[in-house]
Amino acid sequence: MNPGLKWKLWGMLGLIILALYALAPTFLGFSQIREVFKTEQKTLPWYVDLFPEKGLNLGLDLRGGIYIELDVQVEEGLATKLDLLTQDVVRDLKSRDVEPLRWTRDDKALFVTFFFKNDADLQAALKLAAKDYKGALDRGQIVAGDQPSVRFFLTPDYEKQIRKDVVSQAVQAVRNRVDRYGLAEPTVQRMGTSRIVVELPGVKDPDRALKIIQQAGKLEFKIVNSTVNQTELGNWIAAARQEKKLAIGYSAEEVQKLNEALKPKLPEGTEVAFEIARDPSTGTVTQAIPYLLDKTAYVTGDMLKSAQVQVDPQSSEPYVSLTFNPVGAKNFGELTKAHVKELLAIMLDGNVASAPQIREPILNGQCKIDLGGNLDRETQLKEAKDLTLVLQEGALPARLKEATKTVIGPTLGEDSIARSLKAIYIGTFLVVIFMVFYYKWSGLLADIAVVLNTLFIFALLAMFQATLTLPGMAGIALTIGMAVDANVLIFERIREELAAGQMPKAAVAAGYSNALRAIIDSNLTTIIAGVVLYQYGTGPVRGFAVTLMIGLVCNIFTAVVMTRSVFEYFLTVRKIEKISV
């Protein structure tokens, strides 16, 4: 046997074995076995580790799951950054023996106003801002008087950068959460300027997954303002709701509307927030305790070092233990030292998680969040784990507002697979029958090449962890037709050469040589079209383009290289004298 032909045949056999090896986890269900053994904390069978960890990824339309688009509330991220900058300015002023009388932030126009004792302190603040905050803060209106004041805005370039960072950080935070949640093949990507697209195929608990994704994880520590008692505050809230015809609700939007209605009565620089208690079975609000808080967040979740689930040895109830980084520990220590005997509101996503009294300065940089006594222990433990996951992976820089959501059931996905496979089976069967009927044994060889082509497509998708979608199945069906088209061109050329009196070996060589240019031209132009579809298309269009391009590359190999090697084997080794074509 020709050494070159021998290596070709062994190479082809090796590629077939490699493709079967890559697809073994898919066909033998190893992914499900890994998931079951991991859940039950058992040791995997030894043979499972011999194969790749992941098999073929099925898209949302084939597997079922959640498709959700989320709008990032970028303005909230800007307000948070302005608050942190304000704290930095106040800290730097105090280090220069300058202490502002007070400061307030305008929620709509996004500026902060500082009030000072005298003009000398004002000038010190202006000098500090011009020197140390030149790229971040622009000076606005200056008002002279007994309490001179100055406004500071975010610079346009700094604001633009923050907007970009807020969305990027939100995308990364969501990606980290779905990865830690243990979902297989999640897709998280940015759409436009401030929208995030999340696809979670195969998710078993959609409500819990959505809660983890959307939970901002925005942790803040604010001082409870004691100038208004809770009874009076409750009366103000009831009157405002009645006067402005506001619904009784506790979402971020509803609380914001309530604060706008209460603005004339509330002390400057304060806001209302609620501590919510819910029914463990229905999730409805059973109690809402209002608090009047200072707007300024002195310590935030950005300053966290770690968050862990702990169990109280006395009550046996789980809670979340927080440890701050050096900056957070310093800020937390200064905050508790300056406000002993006052209430400290621990805010989570705009709601008061708890409001304990500061009995003494807390200088070790640690605190805890209780989950509430109205929940059973199992629910408390689950919520504690979810909250820890959210806090550990980083708080969202801004809230995510649901723009659109589609939940695809697994039954619909199975139905899509069944219909797609049925279409492929029928199409393949008709092609096989036609090729065998029209080209006899050569047609059977072409059919085997088509089967190997499909095998290689699935194997490459599995190896590169590409996702197979419903349009991708359509791409495979189209590829099958184009694969046969290449063999038709070759066989017709061989027939022409045989009719011209050529010997079988020479006819095969001339047939492949003459048809090769047309095959490459047709496949290459289609691949170029696929590249354009992938580059400028979205979602389903890209899924179609991926399988189409992979299929065409495999087609050139199977239809040209593999089938010709088989012809050469029979002509040179088996020395056949007649070709069935």
Image: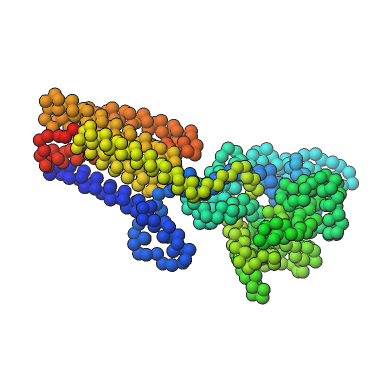
- Residue at the location (17% across, 45% down)? 6
- Give the image location of residue 88, x and y in percent: 71, 52
- Residue at the location (34% across, 53% down)? 24
Q: In which quarter of the image is residue 364?
A: bottom right
**Quadrant showing the N terminus:** top left
Please give left or right for residue 233 compared with residue 571 in the image. Answer: right
Q: Is residue 27 visible?
A: yes
Count the numbered circles shown: 0
Q: In which quarter of the image is residue 29?
A: bottom left
Please give left or right for residue 561 compared with residue 159 in the image. Answer: left
For residue 156, above or below residue 283: above
Q: Can residue 560 be seen in this view?
A: no
Q: Quadrant of residue 435?
A: top left
- The residue most toward the bottom is 314
- Give the image location of residue 365, x and y in percent: 67, 65
Please give left or right for residue 398 compared with residue 423 in the image. Answer: right
Please give left or right for residue 386 compared with residue 94 in the image. Answer: left
- The residue most toward the right is 146
- Give the image location of residue 486, x and y in percent: 28, 32
- Residue at the location (26% across, 41% down)? 448
For residue 183, above or below residue 431: below
**Quadrant showing the C terminus:** top left
For residue 316, above or below residue 74: below
- The residue most toward the top is 500
Name the foreground residue: 356 vs 30. 30
Name the foreground residue: 491 vs 103. 491
- Give the image location of residue 381, x and y in percent: 61, 65
